Image (tube, rainbow, N blue to C red):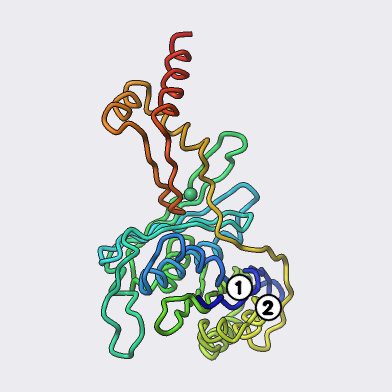
């Protein structure tokens, strides 16, 4: 088996441009998309769709405060099913696609047909936060899917639902033949209320003239390189950076709490019917197995707790 080439760690850089009238975020996500693909065993089309959604979530999460997270649900009626991608302010990203082992015919131009794989439907974005003080304030926005190509859909969502004129570009490059993620990245440009018309039309030109994001990522572009290409000769300065990685919050303890929440009767029923319990985390595909003895221990603890 040939070893994968070593990719630099995934990074996200946030910057402002044109006297703070423009916000720009760029990210490289090759490693985290490789990890998502490995965990879910996803085929090419599903990998690209999931990789774009994960990258989009990471870009949107760049504006979050410490304990917040954002979740993107792409609820398409196409063959790959719903895509869920979540990112937090620490740079942790996780997600899954309902039918990862799905491919669709290529487009006439020979490219993967992500729009057809996702299909028509809706995009939902949920922002949550304040977990440390027991608050889960959620902001929810939904728009119909424009093309199912994901970057266009997220751009439409940000402009329409959050009312910030935005341009997002996402790209995942699959190596020919073997289904390995060769490169992945994206950028988001947002126009703040102070921007004048001249800046906006200049940006439209530079973004249109920038090389495709897959091409930049394949050439080893850093987030700073991507920002430079997207902004052309506009002045910009970096504000912050963070590393990104595929990270899931699931654990054996959480799985036990989840089972306990079902109640002693339900756990008893699982014990009788299955002799054990096996739970799979949707987000990262980790499997947690609890033996009959583990279940009996949880049932006893729950019964004792309920009796006291
Ligand atoms: Zn997990």
Under circle 1, the secondary element is strand
Image spot of residue 29 (x, y percent): 56, 70
| Horizontal side, residue 39 vs residue 276: left or right | right
The answer to whether the residues at label 1 and label 2 have Cβ atoms under 8 Å apart is yes
Q: Residues within 10 Å of mark 2 (few under 14, many from 20)?
A: many
Image spot of residue 215 (x, y percent): 53, 86
Q: Residues within 10 Å of mark 1 (few under 14, many from 20)?
A: many
Residue annotated with mark 1: 26
Residue 223 image-quadrant placement: bottom right
Q: Is residue 277 above or below residue 93?
A: above
| Residue sitting at x 42%, y 85% | 176
The numbered disc on residue 224 is 2
| Residue sitting at x 59%, y 87% | 219
| Horizontal side, residue 70 vs residue 75: left or right | right
Q: Is residue 282 above or below residue 10?
A: above
**Furthest residue in direction top, as rendered:** 308
């Amino acid at each position: 088996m040939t070893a994968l080439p070593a990719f630099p760690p995934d990074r996200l850089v946030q910057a402002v441009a044109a006297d703070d009238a423009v916000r720009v975020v760029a990210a490289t996500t090759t490693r985290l998309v490789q990890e998502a693909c490995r965990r879910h065993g996803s085929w090419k089309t599903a990998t690209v769709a999931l990789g774009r959604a994960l990258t989009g979530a990471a870009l949107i999460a760049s504006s979050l405060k410490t304990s917040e997270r954002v979740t993107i649900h792409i609820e398409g009626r196409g063959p790959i099913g719903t895509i869920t991608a979540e990112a937090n302010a620490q740079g942790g990203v996780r997600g899954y696609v309902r039918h990862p082992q799905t491919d669709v015919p290529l487009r006439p131009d020979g490219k993967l047909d992500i729009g057809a794989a996702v299909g028509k439907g809706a995009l939902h974005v949920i922002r949550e936060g304040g977990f440390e003080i027991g608050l889960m304030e959620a902001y929810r926005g939904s728009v119909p899917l424009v093309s199912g190509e994901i970057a266009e859909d997220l751009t439409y969502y940000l402009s329409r639902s959050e009312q910030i004129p935005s341009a997002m570009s996402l790209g995942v490059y699959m190596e020919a033949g073997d289904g390995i993620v060769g490169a992945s990245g994206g950028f988001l440009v947002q126009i703040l209320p102070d921007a004048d018309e001249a800046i906006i039309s200049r940006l439209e030109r530079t973004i249109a003239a920038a090389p495709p994001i897959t091409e930049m990522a394949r050439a080893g572009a850093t987030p700073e390189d991507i920002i430079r290409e997207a902004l052309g000769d506009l002045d910009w300065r970096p504000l912050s950076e963070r590393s990104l990685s595929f990270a899931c919050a699931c654990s054996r303890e959480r799985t036990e709490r989840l089972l306990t929440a079902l109640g002693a009767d339900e756990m008893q029923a699982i014990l009788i019917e299955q002799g054990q319990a096996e739970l799979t985390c949707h987000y990262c595909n980790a499997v947690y197995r609890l033996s009959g003895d583990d279940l009996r221990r949880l049932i006893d603890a729950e019964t004792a707790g309920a009796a006291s």
